[in-house]
Each structure stands twice: as structure tokens, then as C-alpha cells.
Image (cartoon, helix red, strand yellow):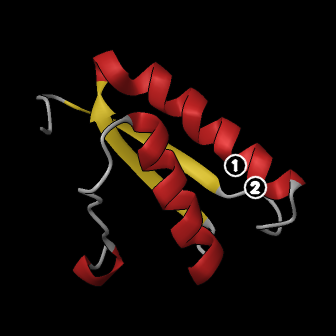
Amino acid sequence: ISPNDVYLEKESQNTQDNATVYYSIAERTSWRKIILLTSAYHMRRAELLFSEHGRRAQQQGRIEGPIEVYTHTVITEPF
């Protein structure tokens, strides 16, 4: 992965905000894939929220087709 293709979002206060920010960027940039990195403890919640945001954005016509969300667990907490 090229460093130019990496976006580390630091503004959000919670996972809900984080998903909102990423899908907003996806709408503007036509992203088709998101690689989500988080801890094993946090992964299930993150997957659910990102899936929910993706479905909603697609139903509202803000994005065309699904955005693939790949998940990877990190060994240590990233924050």
C-alpha cells in the first residue's frame, strides 16, 4: 500500500464519528475499499458501524454500490 493511499483519521471522538468521516471521504473521492485496522476488542463494534454506514449511504444514493471494508486486527491498541 502506498503511503499516499493511507488516511489516518484523528478527529473523531468515537467509532460512530469515525465511520461517518470515512464514508464522507468515500463519497467525495469514489473510494471502493476501506481497510479498517483496530484491536480485537473493538473489531466487532467497528465492523457493525462501518457496515451500517455503508448500507445507509448506498440506500440514500450517496455512494454507488457497496464499498468493500476489509478488517485487520492489530496486536496492540493503536491509541
Residue positioned 53% across, 31% down in the render = 47
Q: Label 1, on which residue?
A: 54
Vertical order, 44 against 68 (above or below): above
- Residue 75 located left or right of residue 56: left
| Amino acid type at mark 1 | Gly
Say which residue appears at 66% left-offset and 45% top-offset.
Answer: 53
What whole-number distance in Å separates the C-alpha atoms at marks 1 and 2?
A: 5 Å
The x and y percentages for residue 55 are 77, 45
Q: Position of residue 59 (x, y in %)?
A: 88, 52
Q: Quadrant of residue 38?
A: top left
Question: Is 15 placed above or below 10 here?
Answer: above
**The residue under label 2 is which amino acid type?**
Ala
Residue at left offset 57%, top offset 82%? 29
Is 1 displayed left or right of 54 in the figure?
left
Q: For the residue labelled by badge 1, is the local secondary structure a helix, a strand or a loop?
A: helix
Residue indicated by mark 2: 57
Residue at disc 2, secondary structure? helix
Evaluate whether residue 34 shows in this view.
no
Quarter of the picture containing the N terminus is: bottom left
Q: Residues within 10 Å of mark 2 (few under 14, many from 20)?
A: many
- Residue 13: quarter of image: top left
Quadrant in which the C terminus is drawn: top left
Residue 65 to residue 31: above or below: above
Number of numbered discs present?
A: 2
Q: Say which of 22 and 17 sits in front.
A: 17
Q: Is residue 22 left or right of residue 72?
A: right
Residue 34 percent across, percent down from the top left: 50, 58
